[in-house]
Amino acid sequence: MKKADANLIKEINLNNVRQAMKRVETATKPQLAALTKLSVVTVNSLVKELHDLGEIFEDETVPSNGGRPALTYRYNYDFSLALVVYMKETQGQELISAAVVNLEDHILQKEEYVMPVFDRQQFYDMIEHFLALYPSIKVIGIGIPGQAVNGEIAVSGRQALMGVRMIEDIETQFGLPVMVENDVNAAISGYCAKLDLDDTQCVLGIYFPMRYPPGMGIYLDGKVFKGKNGMAGEIKFLPMDLDWYHEMDKETFVGSVCQIIQSVNAVLAPDKIVIYQDMVGADIWNPAWEAYRNRKPMPSYPEVILQETFQQDFEAGMRWLTLKELEPALSHFN
């Protein structure tokens, strides 16, 4: 039991040094001891271990108050890489975008592939291509317009994705952990991470893509709330009798958005609702929403934000969520 406890403490301390190095990039051993509140003796052994692994490397020596010059260590942000893949629509084209990112969220390489209909073999060949180029890839994150249940994509506006067991297939073929996330969940995660919002805030993201039903992400207590089988936010099932697969006029669209906001606000009372759409501008939306509020009183009113940055937030959120998968799992230490 004592040995297990000692190993546990060592792993926690190692992660503390690792996180400090990632945060400051360069540091001497005394500086790391001050940052982590660990003894210099403990830091010495942990730095040696990280150095032997290749996670940090020796940098330069710096003067040390009249004593021997101190050796500086630099964090190796390329020690572990992530392959992040997004499925998106741009100017009416269905695209697969793939990016290799390092632990600093720096994009090392990015490529896009036109894929009008999801082709499983072409998709897996693309993954194999990047893994051959970057052997340090240790996790794969995939953003999809849909939701996986027990490993199988069960809800998606793209029929070719339905029934695909993406996580199981890729993990079996390539031997790496795979994280699959819904596009709007990733986008609202990216939006909140970018603003570094207080974890106590509840923020909803609602995405209205062209020619497809809307989806909603719920960011609560610093993470996405997914509900049973990940189905929280499937607002296309609200009883509104709308055909989202065909273009609708602006008045119908704005009225529908107002109804959806009223419905989700009555249940969740969020602080903010981010609306991702490109149908109408603020000149149409603001007076329409104000008139709706006057007709339909609510117990509280969220800040409603029109955004045109869905793709940027989606990609930023996928990178953030995938890189989090590379962090040591320390929850069982608590």
Image (spheres, rainbow, N blue to C red):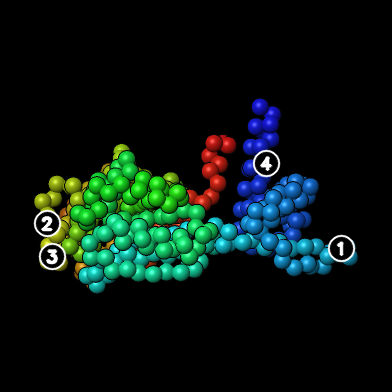
User: In the picture shown, does residue 193 fall above or below 163?
Assistant: below
> Which one is earlier in the sequence, the residue at label 4 or at label 1?
4
Q: Nearer the N terminus, badge 4 or badge 3?
A: 4
The residue type indicated by label 3 comes to Glu
The C terminus, quarter of image? top right
Q: Please identify, in this view, whether the residue under mark 4 or under mark 3 is nearer the observer.
A: 4
Asked which secondary structure carries label 2, the reply is loop
Q: Residues within 10 Å of mark 3 (few under 14, many from 20)?
A: few
Assess disc 2: are there few (<14), some (14-19) or many (≥20) residues with their C-alpha within 10 Å of its C-alpha.
few
Amino acid type at circle 4 is Lys
Please give the residue where the numbered disc 1 appears in the rendered image.
68
**Where does the image place residue 269, in percent across and percent down from the top left?**
32, 47
Q: Is residue 293 visible?
A: no
| Residue furthest top as drawn | 1
Name the residue carrying label 4: 10
Q: Compute the Cα span from label 1 to label 3.
A: 72 Å
Dot 1 falls on a residue whose secondary structure is loop
Cα separation between marks 4 and 3 = 59 Å
Query: With respect to residue 3, does 70 lie above or below?
Result: below
Residue type at numbered disc 1:
Arg
Q: Residue at x 24, y 72 (%)?
A: 91
Which residue is denoted by mark 2 in the rendering? 243
> Is 194 displayed left or right of 31 in the figure?
left
The kind of secondary structure element at disc 4 is helix
